[in-house]
Amino acid sequence: MDSIVVKGGRELNGQIHIAGAKNAALALMPATLLSEEPLTLTNAPRLSDMKTMAELLRSLGAEITALQDGKVQVMSTHGAINTTADYDIVRKMRASNLVLGPLLAREGHAIVSLPGGCAIGARPMDIHTDGLEKMGASIELKDGYLHAKAAGGKLKGAVIDFPFASVGATENLMMAATLAKGTTVINNAAREPEIVDLATCLRAMGAQIEGDGTSRIEIQGVDRLGGATHPVVTDRIELGTYMLAPVFTGGEIECIGGRMHLVESFVEKLDAAGVDVTETKLGLKVKRRGDRPRAVDVTTEPFPGFPTDLQAQMMAMLCIADGKSVLTETIFENRFMHAPELIRMGADIEVHGNTATVTGVDKMKGAPVMATDLRASVSLILAGLASEGETIVNRVYHLDRGYEHVEEKLGAVGAQIERITGK
Ligand code: EPZ
């Protein structure tokens, strides 16, 4: 297993290119199941999660070609397709559950393994399955697999009220509704930019969707969808992660491809912490005002609130801020696993349930630490940038799921960082 070694204390200056969004691409790729025509994604991120999704779609009968060093994915699914998504592949990545809606819409039946729990929480699928049942699907859990069948082989439009603005459930139901008979309305839908990106791609394929980006989405079912070429939206979580880097080290970083509308609530918190963010023609320029950020309280919420996927990175920054901050995680039940690792580096954090109180310290010290989930692992690298001595982050396969070549991107702007290839 690879590790990443960071030596702290270097100021960062320069430009970092932000890739296409992992959480958009993982919803866009299953959309190929909805049409027999080719679907091409450009600006696709080059991540291990994309490889896992490609493996799953190939097992269902899709043909996928990665071009231009993986940044373009050309996919097509013609003819009969296999409608069983096997546990062996699904267990590696929860987003595999996003084939359920498209398979039901295309073939009228599907057998999809439950993804199983994950480090950050139980992450059930009840909002997905309740919505699909409202559209006339019968869904039974047998031996860890969801066996789904659409009555009469075709889903029908329905009005669906979500108890929680689930991102994945919004994506699954939106895709299922594109080929259903009649009109579907999703109330309390998720509003993330990745939802808008998926709706934009589905419209390019011929779907009739309105209201994406608001909490009420209306979809008129059509008989068939065609192909499309779609550019994957910029990754707002990778963007926020690299915007934080100069806050740890001093200096100025321009995140190329970043746009303010993707990270508004995050920028509000950076401003309160004493960080300047300026939108340029190319992206977002970030520089901290003083020689140390200020403490700020943060509560994670569905978009447009503060993103849960930037909570770990923000906690790492607050560990060196001037003052006491309170972080409240409202989306997942177990998303503070980075706290004990940051404490090993000298941070002062007290966790009580879904609240963490962080008291800033003057200096943190590098240490060997363990990555536990994707965003926790990158928060440890950020902390290492501002720590005395050497930080060794182990199990970086978590990192490779969501960040392209993090050591190259940070190294190019002055960080002392290298990857040690493990046995
Ligand atoms: C997406 O996961 C993202 N993943 C997550 O990013 C992100 O943290 C999450 O949205 C919230 O923004 C992808 O897009 C691939 P949810 P998803 O359904 O769709 C509960 C990362 O680091 N819930 O909005 O699974 C669930 O347990 C990852 O890139 C139900 O109870 O998120 C969780 O507590 C991590 N029943 C909360 O809702 C359901 O049927 C949010 O889940 C569905 C969800």
Image (cartoon, grey):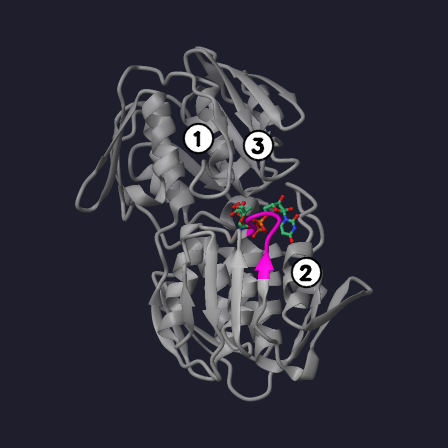
Q: Examine the residues drawn in magenta and state their main secondary structure.
A: loop
Residue 172 on image: x %, y %: 56, 63
Nearest the viewer among 14 and 115 is: 115
Left-right relation of 265 to 15: right
Q: What is the secondary structure assignment of the residue under circle 1?
A: helix
Distance between the alpha carbons at the discs numbered 2 and 1: 40 Å
- What is the residue that sits farthest to the right in this orientation? 143
Determine if the magenta segment contains residue 161.
yes
Label whose residue precedes the other's in the sequence (2 or 3)? 2
Q: Which residue is mark 2?
A: 130
Asked if the residues shown at circle 2 and circle 1 are in contact, with their CB atoms under 8 angstroms apart, the answer is no
Asked if the residues shown at circle 2 and circle 3 are in contact, with their CB atoms under 8 angstroms apart, the answer is no
How dense is the environment of label 2, judged by Cα within 10 Å: few (below 14), some, or many (20 and up)? Answer: some
Which mark is nearer the camera, 1 or 3? 3
Residue lying at 68% horizontally and 72% vertically, measured from the top left: 137
Label whose residue precedes the other's in the sequence (2 or 1)? 2
Nearest the viewer among 270 and 420 is: 270
Q: Quadrant of the N terminus?
A: top right
Residue 43 on image: x %, y %: 34, 61
Q: Which residue is mark 1?
A: 382
Indicate the amino acid at tag 3.
Glu
Whether residue 217 is situated above or below residue 150 in the rendered picture = above
Span colored in magenta: 160-166
Whether residue 363 is situated above or below residue 257 in the rendered picture = above
Left-right relation of 141 to 86: right
Q: Which residue is mark 3?
A: 329
